[in-house]
Image (cartoon, rainbow, N blue to C red):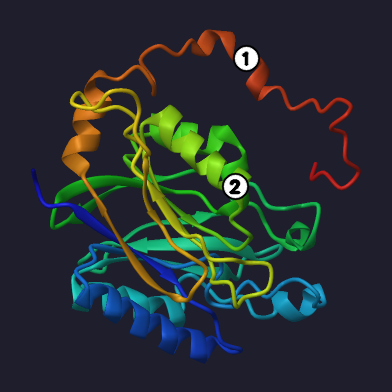
Amino acid sequence: MGKPLKIALLQIAPGDTLEENLEKGLRSCREAKRRGADIALFPEMWSSGYRIYGRPPEQWTAEAIPASGAFVRVFRGLAGELEMAIAVTLLERWKGGPRNSLVLFDRFGAPKFTYAKVHTCDFDAERHLTPGEDFYVAGLDTACGEVKVGAMICYDREFPESARILMLKGAELILVPNACPMEINRLSQLRARAYENMTAIATCNYPETVPDCNGGSSVFDGVAYLPHLEGSRDTCILQADGREGVYIAELDLEQLREYRKSEVHGNAYRRPSRYALLTDETVREPFVRADRRK
């Protein structure tokens, strides 16, 4: 067996200021590296701690920062210093309204992509955000070799199309920053996305000390069957409790890649010509919502 890919989920509580979050984020990344991590993943909108509920929109939108600004550049430098990939999250300053974004740096500090949440929660405060326009996959150089990595953010998880398009673009691992209660149904969504796409999915949530969050960060490796096992196996290789901490999962990439060569899920037996209705934007009852973004 080859060296496992070590994924650090930074299930940490934010402070009250950008400076506090910068310092705590740096400490947590250093701890992840001390424990052998190849990739460190933050929870959703780390720069501001996802503090958008119960506050006037003009107040929290003013906290948006540029993806090319000092906060993000520090993590770029740290990635190169530690030789560890870092997926840092932020409330990104953007024309027309901020974005809920993730910036991925490889272990040399090179930027791989900036992803903005496509499925914003328009039924609540996130209607003041600018949605992202696409999903991205990049080859990430790691100590285990190149890994095809994509990203989706929180509510993106609830739409099968998010993980599906990432799989079709070649993703082997999907990084998912999160900020909500990870209860049985949301965990089941992640399990399903990993199973049906034969893709590993790593989710980082805030700990239970953060309002409306409960920890439960997880990694599903996407491998449901192994030749030497009768029946299926649990694809969950890490499930954090509610406590604050840095949680490390070891992903067996060789096992995942061998599985993807022969199993029946993923792309081999799809029939895209029968799915035209999926691109029809008409919304009919009972799903009509007045606050739907046009």
Q: Please, which residue is most extreme toward the front here?
A: 230
Looking at the image, residue 66 sits to the left or right of residue 279; the answer is: left
Res 120 visible? yes
Q: Where is residue 52? Give x, y as percent.
A: 72, 72
Relative height, residue 23 to residue 119 (above, below):
below
Which residue reaches farthest left?
A: 1
Secondary element under disc 1, as helix, strand or loop, is: helix
| Amino acid on which disc 2 is placed | Ile
- As helix, strand or loop, the secondary structure at mark 2 comes to helix
Could you tell which of marks 1 and 2 lies nearer the N-terminus? 2
In the rendered structure, which amino acid carries the disc numbered 1? Answer: Ala
**Quadrant, the C terminus:** top right
- Picture coordinates of residue 214, whole percent (x, y): 59, 66
Residue 290 quadrant: top right
Q: How many marks?
A: 2
Horizontal side of 271 relative to 27 (left or right) equals right
Circle 1 sits on which residue? 276
Pointer 1: residues within 10 angstroms few (<14), some, or many (20+)? few
Residue 134 visible, this angle: no
In terms of depth relative to the viewer, which is nearer, 105 or 187?
Answer: 187
Q: Which residue is the site of mark 2? A: 184
Residue 215 percent location from the top left of the image: 53, 65
